Image (spheres, grey):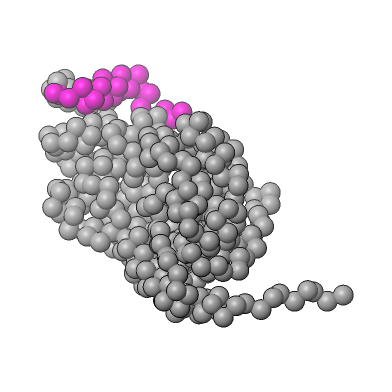
Amino acid sequence: MGQTARPAKSPLRTFLDREAAAAGFDLVRVVRPDAVPELPQRLRQFVKDGHHATMGWLAERMEARADPRRLWPEVRSVIMLAMNYGPDHNPLDDLARTSHGVISVYAQNRDYHDVVKGKLKQLAGKLAARADADVKVFVDTAPVMEKPLAAAAGLGWQGKHTNMVSRSHGSWLFLGSIFTTTFLEADAAESDHCGRCSACLDICPTNAFPAPYRLDAGRCISYLTIEHHGPIPRALRPAIGNRIYGCDDCLAVCPWNKFAQSASEAKLAGRADRRAPALRDLLALDDAAFRSLFSGSPVKRTGRDRFVRNALVAAGNSGDAALVPACRRLLDDAAPVVRGAAVWALSRLLPARDFLALAAERAADADQSVREEWQAARTAARTGNDREFA
């Protein structure tokens, strides 16, 4: 028997698909706002387990995050869209350049929030005019759980690394959504095609996945280098290597990337000058230079102090003694989080005797967190336990 023919798309849906492609979106699907009834419980469990780390905003407005109708009661259809940002190289190759800092593929060019949101507004405006309907657009910054909705809409599925995976674009997709009061036919959800593969779980440097499809953000390098304030936990620093903003390991190793293409939007394509900048240059950044270097980039939102903190962790992992002078200068930085990271970096780059001599001169810092760094580093230097990773 032949396959059952799919029903013809409505004129409005045909219009939506055509205009989405014209705006630069690679995928567009529609889902009902109540398509993931288990989402509230999943979010509550995530927060209960403490896997949201210090991201307290995830615990706020949980009901609105888990149910689009709580966010906007009038919504009848949720349009999920995806834009490919696939790299033109293997991001894992840059990890071998230990005197350079690796920036996640998504952050090497323009801020995707701005790029995607601009295109969403353009598309939503056309849809609103055609359908005489109200619309709202969201890109990551609002309380919308986009990945489960995208999976329910059929854009792909949430892989074992909890990120979206597409059979046509692998793990390299930016998501955005349009909520609308008009009715559009919904698409079928995509099946999970991870099978027995555990590549994304196995490669994680910090063991951030307590189980498949579960992420402990407190151990995730992306969280630690972007969202986390204050010192990065000492036990996790060695595993961070030279990743200074985000981490692409679990994405880059996904076998479905064999079908991925390079970024379809030029403003989202990776930039060679931001792939892996030299640590010696990053350690010299003051606030003005940082803002200038990363103007228009999502990196800028992290701020200079946390970014230089990350660069110092990478310096400590580099084994490059040529970075010692730059690290020593940062012992006098105005930010305690920078001074503390400089202490750790020097404890890894200097011979133990030289570091202990330096500590005898400099350990009396005005900030308690920095004094704690000196104490922990001195203990590690005396015991030879400076490379322990738990």
Q: Main secondary structure of the magenta part?
A: helix
State the residue at coordinates (60%, 68%): 185
Tell me if 45 is positioned left or right of 334 in this view.
Answer: right
- Identify which residue, 150 or 206, lies in the foreground: 150
Taking 13 as reference, is 241 left or right? left
Image spot of residue 201 (x, y percent) = 56, 44
Is residue 188 visible in the rendered structure shown here? yes
The tally of labels here is 0
**Is-magenta flag for residue 93?**
no
Classify residue 22 as left or right of residue 162: left
Farthest residue toward the right? 1
Q: Residue at x 58, y 59 (%)?
A: 32
Pick the front one: 226 or 147: 147
In which quadrant will I find the N terminus?
bottom right
The x, y position of residue 206, in whole percent, is: 47, 38
Residue at figure coordinates x 75%, y 76% from the top left: 5
User: Residue 267 appears in which quarter of the rendering?
Assistant: bottom left
| Residue 30 higher or lower than 69, as above or below | below
Between residue 157 and residue 313, name the one nearer to us: 157
Q: Is residue 285 above or below residue 337?
A: below
Residue 304 left/right relative to 310: left
Could one spot residue 268 in this view of the protein? no
Q: Provide residue 316's location: percent of width, then percent of height.
A: 30, 38
Report the span colored magenta.
365-390
- Residue 358 placed where, x, y %? 17, 26
Is 376 included in the stretch rendered in magenta? yes
**Depicted 371 relative to depicted 297: above or below:** above
Q: Residue at x 19, y 32 (%)?
A: 336
From the viewer's side, name the closer residue of 216 and 274. 216
